[in-house]
Image (cartoon, coloured by chain):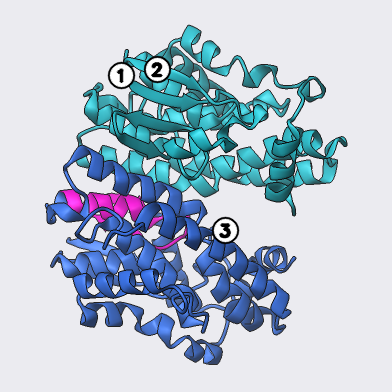
């Protein structure tokens, strides 16, 4: 039985997994969990991940949540090339360091932009709040500054000369604001250069494929939320 | 030059690193970073001219900035190698010092379970448990204002949700998060959950399963070491007597205002 990956490419961590699995020719069954249709709230999916979130993995009887855990699991099980999670102690530590730091910084702030600009309007049926968006952008700017100063510096990738899980996890998060029309790469030449390198290391075609959905999400009015989902999101998003 | 660990035991992740290093007899130099005395808590790099500060204090701050540009604890210095983020530090130490397997099991699926918890922890238990300290002690200390009880209730309600998920998904009916022995997952969780205890929010009360797990973790760590690591947070009332650095107050003002909203 082949590994099952429960994904919605709208989600950043799902994209990281999708790219990683495809790039490394890891055979898997793509189980589409459509977030905007509330598929993640279904009981069926709850059996795979009781936290009701994507991504999730099912490998025989073994189920796993959290993209970082899944990425590491796949890298070990399928013996992926060393550069993704270097065996060198210090290089590996630097990948761990980024993967840990990013949760409450790049990831959180990037999500906030998406929530403010796309999700909340979808749920409440009103245009987004420019003040809230500005606040979210400011916060991401802070995180981006630290990203460039501490994690990227003047290196081609976060950990030395080759792409690793750190770069992959970072790039998919940074594409989320881009998908919402907030071009965080504008006026950040170092970041732009890093992005090009990452895209090339991943393969432009695969990168585009993974990001097709998020890059076409600008028209929320065409999306209908199910009433159940709308209620669920209203609860989640209350200030 | 040996391993240096920059720690303040008031901080939950610092306690995890401290306990792990001590428990595994990892030789290290304890570099005490006093968050509320050395203005380290602020995220900005220390300025060149700080007339209010002792020369020694400023030197220490600048030195620390070289260890961790993010100006946060815990931080590690191993020769010229510096590392931030407790998860990264714990994993680095476990590998370098070849600690017993149960901390980060070599079995692929067990290891994945530890990774799964360590990832989920960041935005669920961590931060939420710690907010209790801010609401009950730190914000009043820094601003001179006590917050309305609804604020604390809000934080406790949020934490309750995470605790429910913790019990339902991560702990279930097992003695530890990953099977029958303590791992890094339990260690990261327990130190975080001791934070509300320190300020009088007993989250173990009315949670027998969680209580049992706590006892098991304390025993696995060693009660003496556990107490030692938690002495500061369990005597947090002493904090009321500390002189707060005015520059620190200033640095924290925007963060505090946000937390009070």
The answer to whether the residues at label 1 and label 3 have Cβ atoms under 8 Å apart is no
Q: Residues within 10 Å of mark 3 (few under 14, many from 20)?
A: few
Task: Based on the picture, tell me whether residue B78 belongs to the magenta stretch.
Answer: yes
Region of the chain picked out in magenta, as a range: B67-95
Task: Name the residue beneath numbered marker 2.
Answer: A29
Which numbered dot is residue B44?
A: 3
Nearer to me, B140 or B170 = B170
Which numbered dot is residue A2?
A: 1
Q: Using the image, determine if residue A2 lies above or below residue B231.
A: above
Label 1, secondary structure: give it. loop
Q: Chain letter for mark 1, please.
A: A
Residue A35, x across and y down, in percent: 61, 30
Residue A77, x across and y down, in percent: 23, 28
Residue at (69% x, 44% y) in the render:
A232
Labels 2, 3: one chain: no
Labels 1, 2: one chain: yes
Q: Is residue A187 visible?
A: no
Label 2, secondary structure: give it. strand
Residue at (51% x, 67% y) in the render:
B129
Q: Chain letter for mark 3, please.
A: B
């Amino acid at each position: 039985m082949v590994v099952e990956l429960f994904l919605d490419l709208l989600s950043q961590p799902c994209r990281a997994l999708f790219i990683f699995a495809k790039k490394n020719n890891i055979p898997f069954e793509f189980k589409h969990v459509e977030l905007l249709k509330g598929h993640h709230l279904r009981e069926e999916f709850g059996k795979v991940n009781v936290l009701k979130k994507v991504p999730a993995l099912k490998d025989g009887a073994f189920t796993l949540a959290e993209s970082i855990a899944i990425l590491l699991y796949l890298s070990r099980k399928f013996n992926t090339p060393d550069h993704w999670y270097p065996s060198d102690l210090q290089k590996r530590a630097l990948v761990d360091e980024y993967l840990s730091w990013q949760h409450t910084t790049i990831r959180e702030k990037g999500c906030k932009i998406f929530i403010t600009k796309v999700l909340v309007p979808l749920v409440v049926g009103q245009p987004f709040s420019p003040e809230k968006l500005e606040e979210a952008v400011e916060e991401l700017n802070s995180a981006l500054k630290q990203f460039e100063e501490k994690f990227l510096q003047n290196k081609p990738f976060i950990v030395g000369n080759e792409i690793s899980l750190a770069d992959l996890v970072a790039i998919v998060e940074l594409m989320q604001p881009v998908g919402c029309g907030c071009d965080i790469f504008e006026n950040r030449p170092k970041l732009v250069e890093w992005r090009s390198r990452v895209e090339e290391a991943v393969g432009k075609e695969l990168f585009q494929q993974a990001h097709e959905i998020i890059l076409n999400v600008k028209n929320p009015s065409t999306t209908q939320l199910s009433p159940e989902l709308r209620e669920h999101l209203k609860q989640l998003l209350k200030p | 030059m040996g391993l240096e660990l920059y720690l303040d035991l008031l901080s939950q992740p610092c306690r995890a690193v401290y306990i792990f290093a001590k428990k595994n007899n990892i030789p290290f130099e304890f570099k005490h970073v006093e968050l509320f005395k050395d203005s380290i808590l602020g995220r900005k790099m220390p300025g060149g001219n700080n007339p209010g500060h002792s020369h020694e204090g400023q030197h220490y701050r600048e030195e620390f900035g070289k260890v961790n540009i993010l100006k946060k604890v815990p931080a590690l210095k191993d020769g010229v190698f510096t590392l931030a983020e407790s998860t990264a530090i714990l994993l680095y130490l476990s590998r370098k010092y070849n600690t017993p397997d149960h901390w980060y099991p070599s079995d692929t699926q067990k290891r994945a379970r530890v990774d799964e918890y360590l990832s989920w922890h960041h935005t669920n238990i961590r931060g939420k448990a710690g907010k209790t300290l801010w609401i009950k002690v730190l914000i009043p200390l820094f601003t001179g204002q006590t917050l309305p009880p609804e604020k604390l209730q809000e934080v406790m309600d949020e934490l309750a949700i995470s605790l429910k998920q913790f019990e339902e998904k991560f702990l279930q009916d097992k003695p530890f998060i990953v099977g029958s022995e303590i791992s890094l997952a339990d260690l990261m969780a327990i130190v975080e959950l001791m934070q509300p205890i320190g300020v009088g929010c007993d989250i173990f009360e009315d949670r027998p399963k969680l209580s049992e797990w706590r006892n098991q973790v304390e025993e696995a760590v060693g009660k003496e070491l556990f107490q030692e690591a938690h002495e500061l947070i369990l005597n947090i009332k002493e904090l009321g007597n500390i002189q707060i650095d005015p520059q620190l107050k200033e640095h924290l003002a925007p963060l505090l205002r946000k937390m009070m909203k």
